[in-house]
Image: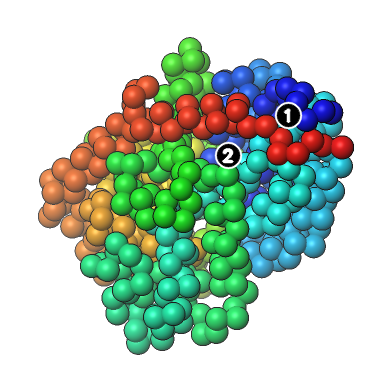
Amino acid sequence: MSKDEVVSPHVLIFPLPLQGPVNCMLKLAELFAINRLRVTFLNTIYIQNLLLKHTNVQSRFSNYPEFHFETIPDGLSEDHPRSSDKLLDLADGIEEVMKPLFIEMLTFGKMSSKSSTPVTCIIADGGYTFVVDVAKDVGIPILYFDTISPCALWTYFCLPRLIELGEVPFKEEEYDKRVTGVCGTENFLRCRDLPSFFRIRDLSDRIIQYNLQEIHEIPRSQGMILNTSEHIDGPIISQLSSHCPNIYSIGPLHALYKSILLSAQKTSEQANYSNSLWEDDNSCMTWLDAQPHKSVIYISIGSLAILTGDQLLELWCGIVYSGKRFLWALRPGSIADKDEKSKTVEELSDATKDRGCIVSWVFQEQVLAHPAIGLFFTHSGWNSTLEGLIEGVPMICWPYLLDQQVNSRFVQEVWKVGIDLKDRYDRVAIEKAVREIMEDKKDEFQKSCSRMAKLARQSVGDQDGSSHCNFSRLVEDIKMMRLLKPSS
Ligand code: UDX
């Protein structure tokens, strides 16, 4: 191909093989397809099989002739649990198996067997630090999409300064000490609010080193996509832009997605398909229909977190003693040690049949939008946080890992839409927080949640919203992208 030959835009989308990133990137991919961009979506074989089993992705995306799925192995055996306590196995599989295959696919132009046009833009998860080097080698522009929260990403960028100031590593006795090295958060961020993996003893820790690499590689890309908006994260976006000047904030993406699909004459049903890696149990929607307005606590710890038997029991007792109705999405495999305590839970569960509904997995966006939901008991994953925020549902945060520790602090201190119960695994604290949000300070929380929901919706509500404008700019920039050097 000659250098001047015009090539039609073709985006390669490469999500991390986890529920949150896959969900976000599928939505982004469909928005591109609606805008007539050619898209190749590269999933791991494992994730693709789960999507084919539990969702309608195949038929949904067959409506877009320029959209194709491709797959790549993740290097793990089929029966590997791929759970949060085994994320380092996944990192090994990616490094040893996926990375060389990806490089080969891209270098020899074999990225899409179903499309003859070359890839003109790569959108990869910020966690794939190796992609920027390959992209530069083959001359394809790259944008990183960091699907974690921008507030946590900002702490990653501050890590060198935190180390320089001696604020990381920190000791357990220092958990409540204010952190000074994360610019803009000095008034409220404590050591315990830093990402879970900052709780290390030794800076040679693998995840810390990985993190340092990530903040080195992301600014080498042509731009960074974030799942947030100016209204939610204005100050954080401006801090991040000192490292990555070209930022596209297009969130909350699930709401932007609905807004664009509806304006593209899709039906409400078509704008509400789930990308779940587990089977959605929709029976809970009928149960919710029968519950009074804002009376139900929705409980979920997301797609990765695992509860110990002790934590499960404390959570159960806190919820049950609060006397409120509840809907619990108890993901298969989310309890570590099924022992005597689980039996107690079974008894409790029998005793609360009249006011509780327990299922294994729900279509969360729909659940949070239901008028019966009055409180979200969450692990503070970034997608869950945005989904709760936009529906104006107050939250009790019980963060476990990764960015969740930072998100929960922002929920309480910045957006003021919930209570952060980080590191407090006790029933009394849970029951008290439930009563505070659903009874004592109900009006106060409702007011701040409505305010934040309104702000979040402004970014995606109409064509002039900031996330709409940033998305249009992203599409136009992709259309302008040309290969940086001719492919062979
Ligand atoms: C973790 C991180 O905390 C997150 O910030 C990061 O981006 C990915 O890894 P996870 O446990 O998957 O995330 O949480 P979250 O980001 O909240 O994503 C979970 C997704 O699963 C949400 O979109 C939620 O709607 C969905 N979900 C969860 C369901 O559809 N049904 C359920 O029953 C539970």
Q: Earlier in the sequence, mark 2 or mark 1?
A: 2
Question: Can residue 118 be spotted in the picture?
Answer: yes
The three-letter amino acid code for the residue at tag 1 is His
Q: Position of residue 231 (x, y in %)?
A: 29, 41
The residue that disc 1 covers is 68
Residue drawn at x 29%, y 64% as measured from the top left: 185
| Residue 66 % position (x, y) | 70, 22
Q: Residues within 10 Å of mark 1 (few under 14, many from 20)?
A: some
Q: Which mark identifies residue 25?
A: 2
Front residue (pair 337, 93) = 93
Secondary structure, mark 1, is strand
Find the distance from the CA under tag 2 to the CA under tag 1.
Answer: 14 Å
Decide if residue 472 is on the left or right side of residue 392.
right
How many marks are shown on the rendered structure? 2
Left/right of residue 216 with respect to residue 272 in the rendered view: right
At x 31% / y 57%, what residue is drawn?
410
Quick one: quadrant of the C terminus? top right
